Amino acid sequence: MDWQERGTVLDSNFPAANQPSYVMCLWQPKLAEYLLSRARVHFILFDVEHVPPDPALLARAASFRVVSNFNALEELAVIAADLRLVDPAIEKVLSFAELSQLGAATVSAMLGLSVDPVGQVAARDKRLMKQLVREADVRTADFWSIRDPADAAAVRLVARRVAFPAVVKPAAGSGTEYTARVADAAELSAFTERFASVPGLESRQLIVEEFVQGTEMHIDAFWDGDQPTFFLVSEYLTPILDTVSGDVIRGSRVLVRDEHVALYDGLLAMNRAVNDALGISAERSVTHMEAFRTPSGEVVFSEIATRIGGAWIPALLSQALGGQDIWAAMADALMDGKAPEISPTAPCLAGLNIRAREAGVITSLPSDEQLLGTPGILDYEVRCEVGDELMMDNASEMCVFVVIGADSPEQLDAYIKTATQRIRVETRPFAESD
Protein backbone atom coordinates (compact mmCIF):
# COMPACT_ATOMS: atom_id res chain seq x y z
CA MET A 1 0.00 0.00 0.00
CA ASP A 2 1.31 3.44 -0.93
CA TRP A 3 0.88 5.38 2.31
CA GLN A 4 1.89 8.65 0.72
CA GLU A 5 -1.07 8.39 -1.65
CA ARG A 6 -3.60 6.70 0.64
CA GLY A 7 -2.69 8.27 3.96
CA THR A 8 -5.20 11.13 3.94
CA VAL A 9 -7.96 9.60 1.80
CA LEU A 10 -11.35 9.16 3.45
CA ASP A 11 -12.80 5.71 2.81
CA SER A 12 -16.60 5.61 2.71
CA ASN A 13 -16.70 2.32 4.59
CA PHE A 14 -19.14 3.11 7.39
CA PRO A 15 -20.86 0.21 9.19
CA ALA A 16 -24.44 0.46 10.40
CA ALA A 17 -25.42 3.90 11.62
CA ASN A 18 -26.42 2.61 15.06
CA GLN A 19 -22.90 1.42 15.85
CA PRO A 20 -20.67 3.53 18.11
CA SER A 21 -17.86 5.52 16.53
CA TYR A 22 -14.28 5.84 17.79
CA VAL A 23 -10.93 7.34 16.79
CA MET A 24 -7.89 5.11 17.41
CA CYS A 25 -4.39 6.61 17.49
CA LEU A 26 -1.47 4.41 16.47
CA TRP A 27 -1.84 0.77 15.50
CA GLN A 28 -2.60 -2.07 17.90
CA PRO A 29 -3.77 -5.02 15.77
CA LYS A 30 -5.74 -6.95 18.39
CA LEU A 31 -7.60 -3.91 19.68
CA ALA A 32 -8.25 -2.78 16.11
CA GLU A 33 -9.79 -6.15 15.26
CA TYR A 34 -12.09 -6.14 18.30
CA LEU A 35 -13.23 -2.57 17.77
CA LEU A 36 -13.84 -3.03 14.04
CA SER A 37 -16.13 -5.97 14.79
CA ARG A 38 -18.41 -3.72 16.86
CA ALA A 39 -17.91 -0.11 15.82
CA ARG A 40 -16.92 2.25 13.09
CA VAL A 41 -13.32 3.26 13.66
CA HIS A 42 -11.24 6.13 12.31
CA PHE A 43 -7.47 5.56 12.53
CA ILE A 44 -4.76 8.18 12.91
CA LEU A 45 -1.49 6.43 12.11
CA PHE A 46 2.20 7.19 12.44
CA ASP A 47 5.44 5.50 11.33
CA VAL A 48 3.56 3.11 9.03
CA GLU A 49 6.73 2.13 7.19
CA HIS A 50 8.13 0.52 10.35
CA VAL A 51 4.83 -0.55 11.90
CA PRO A 52 2.59 -1.30 8.91
CA PRO A 53 -1.08 -1.92 9.73
CA ASP A 54 -2.87 -4.98 8.41
CA PRO A 55 -4.39 -3.90 5.06
CA ALA A 56 -7.32 -6.31 5.50
CA LEU A 57 -8.24 -4.76 8.84
CA LEU A 58 -7.62 -1.23 7.62
CA ALA A 59 -9.94 -1.84 4.67
CA ARG A 60 -12.79 -2.13 7.20
CA ALA A 61 -12.05 1.27 8.77
CA ALA A 62 -14.39 4.22 8.43
CA SER A 63 -11.28 6.26 7.57
CA PHE A 64 -7.58 6.49 8.20
CA ARG A 65 -4.99 9.24 8.14
CA VAL A 66 -1.20 9.24 8.49
CA VAL A 67 0.57 12.01 10.40
CA SER A 68 4.25 12.89 10.51
CA ASN A 69 4.12 12.66 14.32
CA PHE A 70 1.63 13.11 17.15
CA ASN A 71 3.07 16.48 18.14
CA ALA A 72 2.19 18.07 14.78
CA LEU A 73 -0.56 20.42 15.96
CA GLU A 74 -1.55 21.73 12.54
CA GLU A 75 -1.86 18.23 11.07
CA LEU A 76 -3.96 17.05 14.01
CA ALA A 77 -6.15 20.16 13.85
CA VAL A 78 -6.97 19.59 10.17
CA ILE A 79 -7.76 15.92 10.85
CA ALA A 80 -9.97 16.80 13.83
CA ALA A 81 -11.89 19.36 11.77
CA ASP A 82 -12.42 16.81 9.01
CA LEU A 83 -13.58 14.16 11.48
CA ARG A 84 -16.11 16.55 13.02
CA LEU A 85 -17.57 17.11 9.56
CA VAL A 86 -17.73 13.50 8.39
CA ASP A 87 -18.71 11.80 11.66
CA PRO A 88 -20.22 14.00 14.38
CA ALA A 89 -21.15 10.86 16.38
CA ILE A 90 -17.58 10.05 17.49
CA GLU A 91 -17.70 9.08 21.17
CA LYS A 92 -14.06 8.66 22.20
CA VAL A 93 -10.44 8.98 21.07
CA LEU A 94 -8.34 5.97 22.07
CA SER A 95 -4.58 6.00 22.56
CA PHE A 96 -2.62 3.18 24.17
CA ALA A 97 0.94 4.14 23.33
CA GLU A 98 3.11 6.68 25.14
CA LEU A 99 4.07 8.78 22.13
CA SER A 100 0.48 9.36 21.00
CA GLN A 101 -0.94 10.33 24.41
CA LEU A 102 -0.71 14.10 24.06
CA GLY A 103 -1.75 14.13 20.40
CA ALA A 104 -4.76 11.94 21.13
CA ALA A 105 -5.82 14.21 23.99
CA THR A 106 -5.49 17.19 21.65
CA VAL A 107 -7.69 15.55 19.00
CA SER A 108 -10.23 14.67 21.71
CA ALA A 109 -10.41 18.30 22.81
CA MET A 110 -10.74 19.48 19.20
CA LEU A 111 -13.66 17.08 18.74
CA GLY A 112 -15.35 18.56 21.79
CA LEU A 113 -15.01 15.36 23.81
CA SER A 114 -12.79 16.84 26.54
CA VAL A 115 -12.17 20.41 27.61
CA ASP A 116 -9.34 20.30 30.18
CA PRO A 117 -6.13 21.47 28.46
CA VAL A 118 -4.17 21.28 31.72
CA GLY A 119 -5.01 17.61 32.11
CA GLN A 120 -3.93 16.98 28.53
CA VAL A 121 -0.48 18.44 29.14
CA ALA A 122 -0.17 16.69 32.50
CA ALA A 123 -0.77 13.36 30.76
CA ARG A 124 2.75 13.69 29.32
CA ASP A 125 4.69 16.28 31.30
CA LYS A 126 5.78 14.61 34.55
CA ARG A 127 6.33 17.97 36.29
CA LEU A 128 2.78 19.20 35.85
CA MET A 129 1.47 15.72 36.59
CA LYS A 130 3.28 15.64 39.93
CA GLN A 131 2.24 19.18 40.82
CA LEU A 132 -1.46 18.44 40.26
CA VAL A 133 -1.25 15.15 42.12
CA ARG A 134 0.59 16.77 45.03
CA GLU A 135 -2.13 19.43 45.25
CA ALA A 136 -4.55 16.53 45.79
CA ASP A 137 -2.57 15.57 48.94
CA VAL A 138 -0.97 12.52 47.34
CA ARG A 139 2.64 11.88 48.36
CA THR A 140 5.01 12.33 45.41
CA ALA A 141 8.77 12.57 45.14
CA ASP A 142 10.21 16.08 45.31
CA PHE A 143 11.20 17.37 41.88
CA TRP A 144 13.04 20.21 40.15
CA SER A 145 12.96 21.44 36.55
CA ILE A 146 15.85 22.07 34.15
CA ARG A 147 14.54 24.11 31.23
CA ASP A 148 17.77 24.11 29.22
CA PRO A 149 20.33 21.33 29.85
CA ALA A 150 22.91 23.36 27.92
CA ASP A 151 22.70 26.14 30.51
CA ALA A 152 25.48 25.06 32.88
CA ALA A 153 24.74 27.83 35.39
CA ALA A 154 21.09 26.80 35.64
CA VAL A 155 22.11 23.16 36.09
CA ARG A 156 24.47 24.11 38.93
CA LEU A 157 21.69 26.11 40.58
CA VAL A 158 19.35 23.10 40.51
CA ALA A 159 22.14 20.85 41.78
CA ARG A 160 22.47 23.00 44.90
CA ARG A 161 18.79 22.36 45.70
CA VAL A 162 18.66 18.64 44.97
CA ALA A 163 19.01 16.01 47.69
CA PHE A 164 21.17 13.39 45.97
CA PRO A 165 20.93 10.67 44.81
CA ALA A 166 18.32 11.74 42.28
CA VAL A 167 16.71 10.58 39.05
CA VAL A 168 16.92 12.76 35.94
CA LYS A 169 14.88 12.25 32.77
CA PRO A 170 13.01 14.14 30.04
CA ALA A 171 10.00 16.00 31.39
CA ALA A 172 7.85 14.41 28.67
CA GLY A 173 9.87 11.27 28.05
CA SER A 174 8.92 7.74 27.09
CA GLY A 175 9.70 4.75 29.27
CA THR A 176 13.22 4.87 30.67
CA GLU A 177 14.86 6.34 27.58
CA TYR A 178 17.44 9.00 28.55
CA THR A 179 16.78 8.30 32.24
CA ALA A 180 19.53 7.92 34.84
CA ARG A 181 20.19 7.89 38.56
CA VAL A 182 22.81 10.50 39.46
CA ALA A 183 24.79 10.41 42.70
CA ASP A 184 25.94 14.02 42.89
CA ALA A 185 26.19 17.38 41.14
CA ALA A 186 29.05 16.19 38.91
CA GLU A 187 27.01 13.28 37.55
CA LEU A 188 24.01 15.55 36.99
CA SER A 189 26.20 17.98 35.05
CA ALA A 190 27.69 15.17 32.95
CA PHE A 191 24.19 13.84 32.16
CA THR A 192 22.88 17.24 31.07
CA GLU A 193 25.91 17.81 28.84
CA ARG A 194 25.28 14.51 27.05
CA PHE A 195 21.53 15.11 26.86
CA ALA A 196 21.96 18.60 25.39
CA SER A 197 23.61 17.08 22.30
CA VAL A 198 21.26 14.12 21.74
CA PRO A 199 19.84 14.42 18.19
CA GLY A 200 16.18 14.18 17.22
CA LEU A 201 14.46 15.28 20.43
CA GLU A 202 11.65 17.83 20.22
CA SER A 203 11.83 18.89 23.87
CA ARG A 204 14.98 19.40 25.94
CA GLN A 205 13.40 20.15 29.29
CA LEU A 206 14.30 17.79 32.13
CA ILE A 207 12.84 16.80 35.47
CA VAL A 208 15.11 15.92 38.38
CA GLU A 209 13.34 13.81 40.99
CA GLU A 210 14.07 12.72 44.52
CA PHE A 211 15.27 9.11 44.46
CA VAL A 212 12.77 6.99 46.40
CA GLN A 213 14.28 3.94 48.05
CA GLY A 214 12.11 0.82 48.07
CA THR A 215 10.17 -1.57 45.87
CA GLU A 216 8.54 -0.39 42.64
CA MET A 217 5.00 -1.36 41.63
CA HIS A 218 2.71 -1.03 38.64
CA ILE A 219 -1.03 -0.77 39.15
CA ASP A 220 -3.25 -1.58 36.18
CA ALA A 221 -6.94 -0.73 36.20
CA PHE A 222 -10.10 -0.25 34.15
CA TRP A 223 -12.48 2.45 35.37
CA ASP A 224 -16.14 3.27 34.90
CA GLY A 225 -16.10 6.78 36.33
CA ASP A 226 -14.52 6.48 39.77
CA GLN A 227 -15.34 2.77 40.08
CA PRO A 228 -12.67 0.24 39.09
CA THR A 229 -14.00 -2.71 37.12
CA PHE A 230 -10.51 -4.25 37.17
CA PHE A 231 -7.70 -3.44 39.60
CA LEU A 232 -4.44 -5.36 39.83
CA VAL A 233 -1.20 -4.60 41.68
CA SER A 234 2.14 -6.03 40.57
CA GLU A 235 5.65 -5.59 41.95
CA TYR A 236 8.76 -5.26 39.80
CA LEU A 237 11.28 -8.00 40.50
CA THR A 238 14.11 -5.47 40.13
CA PRO A 239 13.69 -1.68 40.24
CA ILE A 240 13.45 -0.45 36.66
CA LEU A 241 16.55 1.75 36.72
CA ASP A 242 18.61 -1.22 37.91
CA THR A 243 17.64 -3.25 34.83
CA VAL A 244 19.27 -1.04 32.20
CA SER A 245 22.29 -3.33 31.86
CA GLY A 246 23.83 -6.35 33.47
CA ASP A 247 22.68 -9.83 34.35
CA VAL A 248 19.53 -9.00 36.35
CA ILE A 249 15.94 -10.25 36.37
CA ARG A 250 13.64 -7.94 34.43
CA GLY A 251 9.94 -8.37 35.10
CA SER A 252 7.16 -8.21 37.67
CA ARG A 253 4.98 -10.49 39.75
CA VAL A 254 1.29 -10.10 40.57
CA LEU A 255 0.52 -9.40 44.22
CA VAL A 256 -2.53 -11.41 45.30
CA ARG A 257 -5.15 -9.13 46.84
CA ASP A 258 -6.06 -11.49 49.71
CA GLU A 259 -2.43 -11.42 50.84
CA HIS A 260 -2.02 -7.64 50.51
CA VAL A 261 -5.40 -6.19 51.51
CA ALA A 262 -4.07 -2.99 53.13
CA LEU A 263 -1.72 -2.29 50.21
CA TYR A 264 -4.54 -2.75 47.67
CA ASP A 265 -6.87 -0.48 49.64
CA GLY A 266 -4.20 2.22 49.93
CA LEU A 267 -3.30 2.07 46.25
CA LEU A 268 -6.95 2.14 45.22
CA ALA A 269 -7.45 5.32 47.24
CA MET A 270 -4.29 6.81 45.69
CA ASN A 271 -5.34 5.87 42.15
CA ARG A 272 -8.76 7.45 42.68
CA ALA A 273 -7.21 10.67 43.99
CA VAL A 274 -4.75 10.80 41.09
CA ASN A 275 -7.55 10.23 38.58
CA ASP A 276 -9.55 13.08 40.09
CA ALA A 277 -6.54 15.41 40.11
CA LEU A 278 -5.83 14.78 36.42
CA GLY A 279 -9.43 14.65 35.18
CA ILE A 280 -9.28 10.94 34.35
CA SER A 281 -12.29 9.89 36.44
CA ALA A 282 -14.96 11.59 34.33
CA GLU A 283 -15.47 8.64 31.98
CA ARG A 284 -14.50 5.06 31.23
CA SER A 285 -10.76 4.76 31.03
CA VAL A 286 -7.71 2.56 31.42
CA THR A 287 -4.82 3.51 33.68
CA HIS A 288 -1.30 2.26 34.29
CA MET A 289 0.04 3.83 37.50
CA GLU A 290 3.50 3.37 39.00
CA ALA A 291 4.37 3.85 42.66
CA PHE A 292 7.06 3.05 45.22
CA ARG A 293 6.74 1.38 48.60
CA THR A 294 9.45 2.53 50.99
CA PRO A 295 11.05 0.27 53.64
CA SER A 296 8.81 1.97 56.23
CA GLY A 297 5.69 1.04 54.22
CA GLU A 298 4.93 4.52 52.85
CA VAL A 299 3.58 4.54 49.30
CA VAL A 300 4.85 7.29 46.96
CA PHE A 301 3.24 8.15 43.61
CA SER A 302 5.54 8.05 40.58
CA GLU A 303 3.48 8.56 37.42
CA ILE A 304 0.35 7.47 35.55
CA ALA A 305 -0.74 6.98 31.94
CA THR A 306 -4.16 6.38 30.41
CA ARG A 307 -3.10 3.27 28.55
CA ILE A 308 -2.25 -0.39 29.01
CA GLY A 309 1.21 -0.99 30.45
CA GLY A 310 3.92 -1.88 27.95
CA ALA A 311 6.42 -4.70 27.45
CA TRP A 312 5.32 -7.99 29.09
CA ILE A 313 2.45 -6.40 31.02
CA PRO A 314 -0.37 -7.01 28.47
CA ALA A 315 0.45 -10.73 28.41
CA LEU A 316 0.64 -10.80 32.21
CA LEU A 317 -2.76 -9.09 32.51
CA SER A 318 -4.25 -11.56 30.03
CA GLN A 319 -3.20 -14.45 32.27
CA ALA A 320 -4.67 -12.61 35.28
CA LEU A 321 -7.97 -12.63 33.34
CA GLY A 322 -7.89 -16.40 32.98
CA GLY A 323 -6.33 -16.29 29.52
CA GLN A 324 -8.81 -13.76 28.06
CA ASP A 325 -7.01 -11.38 25.73
CA ILE A 326 -6.47 -8.08 27.54
CA TRP A 327 -7.28 -6.06 24.41
CA ALA A 328 -10.66 -7.78 24.03
CA ALA A 329 -11.40 -7.22 27.71
CA MET A 330 -10.43 -3.58 27.38
CA ALA A 331 -12.65 -3.07 24.33
CA ASP A 332 -15.63 -4.56 26.21
CA ALA A 333 -14.87 -2.46 29.30
CA LEU A 334 -14.60 0.79 27.33
CA MET A 335 -17.67 0.16 25.18
CA ASP A 336 -20.02 -1.56 27.63
CA GLY A 337 -18.59 -0.93 31.08
CA LYS A 338 -18.29 -4.70 31.33
CA ALA A 339 -16.17 -5.76 34.29
CA PRO A 340 -13.47 -8.27 33.35
CA GLU A 341 -13.17 -10.96 35.99
CA ILE A 342 -9.81 -11.46 37.68
CA SER A 343 -9.46 -15.23 37.46
CA PRO A 344 -5.73 -16.09 37.23
CA THR A 345 -4.65 -19.09 35.20
CA ALA A 346 -2.30 -19.92 38.10
CA PRO A 347 -2.25 -18.86 41.77
CA CYS A 348 1.07 -17.03 41.29
CA LEU A 349 1.96 -15.11 38.11
CA ALA A 350 5.01 -13.24 36.84
CA GLY A 351 6.09 -11.71 33.54
CA LEU A 352 9.69 -11.39 32.34
CA ASN A 353 11.65 -9.55 29.67
CA ILE A 354 14.67 -11.74 28.96
CA ARG A 355 17.56 -9.94 27.25
CA ALA A 356 21.17 -10.63 26.47
CA ARG A 357 23.88 -10.23 29.09
CA GLU A 358 25.82 -7.72 26.99
CA ALA A 359 25.17 -5.20 24.24
CA GLY A 360 25.85 -6.22 20.67
CA VAL A 361 24.29 -7.78 17.59
CA ILE A 362 21.87 -10.61 18.33
CA THR A 363 23.22 -13.93 17.07
CA SER A 364 20.68 -16.40 18.48
CA LEU A 365 17.25 -16.50 20.10
CA PRO A 366 15.38 -19.25 21.96
CA SER A 367 13.30 -21.60 19.84
CA ASP A 368 9.62 -22.37 20.35
CA GLU A 369 10.63 -25.80 21.64
CA GLN A 370 12.94 -24.27 24.26
CA LEU A 371 10.28 -21.85 25.39
CA LEU A 372 7.48 -24.41 25.54
CA GLY A 373 9.76 -26.86 27.35
CA THR A 374 10.62 -24.45 30.15
CA PRO A 375 8.65 -25.19 33.36
CA GLY A 376 5.85 -22.82 34.23
CA ILE A 377 5.69 -20.83 30.99
CA LEU A 378 2.08 -19.98 30.09
CA ASP A 379 2.71 -17.57 27.23
CA TYR A 380 5.64 -16.03 25.38
CA GLU A 381 6.50 -13.58 22.61
CA VAL A 382 9.80 -13.02 20.82
CA ARG A 383 10.04 -9.30 20.00
CA CYS A 384 13.42 -9.18 18.24
CA GLU A 385 15.27 -10.93 15.43
CA VAL A 386 18.74 -12.28 14.79
CA GLY A 387 20.78 -9.38 13.46
CA ASP A 388 19.04 -6.74 15.56
CA GLU A 389 21.26 -4.44 17.60
CA LEU A 390 20.82 -4.49 21.37
CA MET A 391 22.25 -1.35 22.92
CA MET A 392 21.53 -2.15 26.61
CA ASP A 393 21.34 1.58 27.34
CA ASN A 394 17.75 1.73 28.57
CA ALA A 395 15.29 -0.60 30.29
CA SER A 396 12.72 -0.41 27.50
CA GLU A 397 14.54 -2.57 24.94
CA MET A 398 12.33 -5.56 24.19
CA CYS A 399 13.62 -9.07 23.57
CA VAL A 400 11.75 -12.15 24.79
CA PHE A 401 8.63 -11.83 26.94
CA VAL A 402 7.42 -14.80 28.97
CA VAL A 403 4.59 -15.19 31.47
CA ILE A 404 5.13 -17.79 34.19
CA GLY A 405 2.53 -19.44 36.41
CA ALA A 406 3.08 -21.45 39.58
CA ASP A 407 1.19 -22.92 42.53
CA SER A 408 3.19 -21.13 45.25
CA PRO A 409 5.58 -18.19 45.66
CA GLU A 410 8.46 -20.61 46.19
CA GLN A 411 7.66 -22.49 43.01
CA LEU A 412 7.33 -19.20 41.12
CA ASP A 413 10.80 -18.13 42.30
CA ALA A 414 12.21 -21.47 41.13
CA TYR A 415 10.51 -21.19 37.72
CA ILE A 416 11.79 -17.62 37.27
CA LYS A 417 15.33 -18.74 38.04
CA THR A 418 15.08 -21.67 35.62
CA ALA A 419 13.65 -19.48 32.85
CA THR A 420 16.40 -16.89 33.13
CA GLN A 421 19.03 -19.64 33.01
CA ARG A 422 17.57 -21.62 30.09
CA ILE A 423 16.19 -18.91 27.83
CA ARG A 424 19.15 -17.12 26.31
CA VAL A 425 19.54 -14.21 23.93
CA GLU A 426 23.09 -14.30 22.59
CA THR A 427 24.99 -11.36 21.11
CA ARG A 428 28.36 -10.66 19.53
CA PRO A 429 30.22 -7.40 20.09
CA PHE A 430 29.59 -4.57 17.66
CA ALA A 431 32.05 -4.38 14.78
CA GLU A 432 33.03 -1.17 13.02
CA SER A 433 30.87 -2.17 10.04
CA ASP A 434 27.80 -2.30 12.31
Image: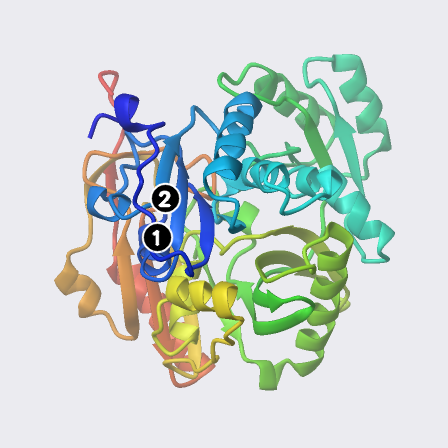
Label drawn at residue 181? none
Query: Compared to 283, does 52 lie above or below?
Result: above
Q: How many marks?
A: 2
The kind of residue tagged 1 is Ala
Label 1 packing within 10 angstroms: few (<14), some (14-19), many (20+): many
Q: Secondary structure at mark 2?
A: loop
Q: Is residue 43 above or below residue 366?
A: above
The quadrant where residue 64 appears: top left
Q: Secondary structure at mark 1?
A: helix
> In which image quadrant can residue 298 be found?
bottom right
Percent of width and height locating residue 401: 33, 57
Q: Residue at x 51, y 76 (%)?
A: 339
Q: Position of residue 398 (x, y in %)?
A: 36, 46
**Residue 340 % position (x, y):** 47, 76
Reply above or below: 216 against 407: above
Decide: is 263 above or below 420: below
**Figure coloring:** rainbow
> How dense is the environment of label 2, judged by Cα within 10 Å: few (below 14), some, or many (20 and up)?
many
Q: Nearer the viewer, residue 187 or 40?
A: 40
Q: Position of residue 114 (x, y in %)?
A: 66, 46
363 on left or right of 78: left
Contact (Cβ within 8 Å) of mark 2 with mark 1: yes
Mark on residue 27? 2
Q: Is residue 337 left or right of residue 428?
A: right
Viewport quadrant of the C terminus: top left
Q: Which residue is identified by label 1?
A: 32
Q: Amino acid at mark 2?
A: Trp
Q: Give residue 59's quadrant in the image.
A: top left
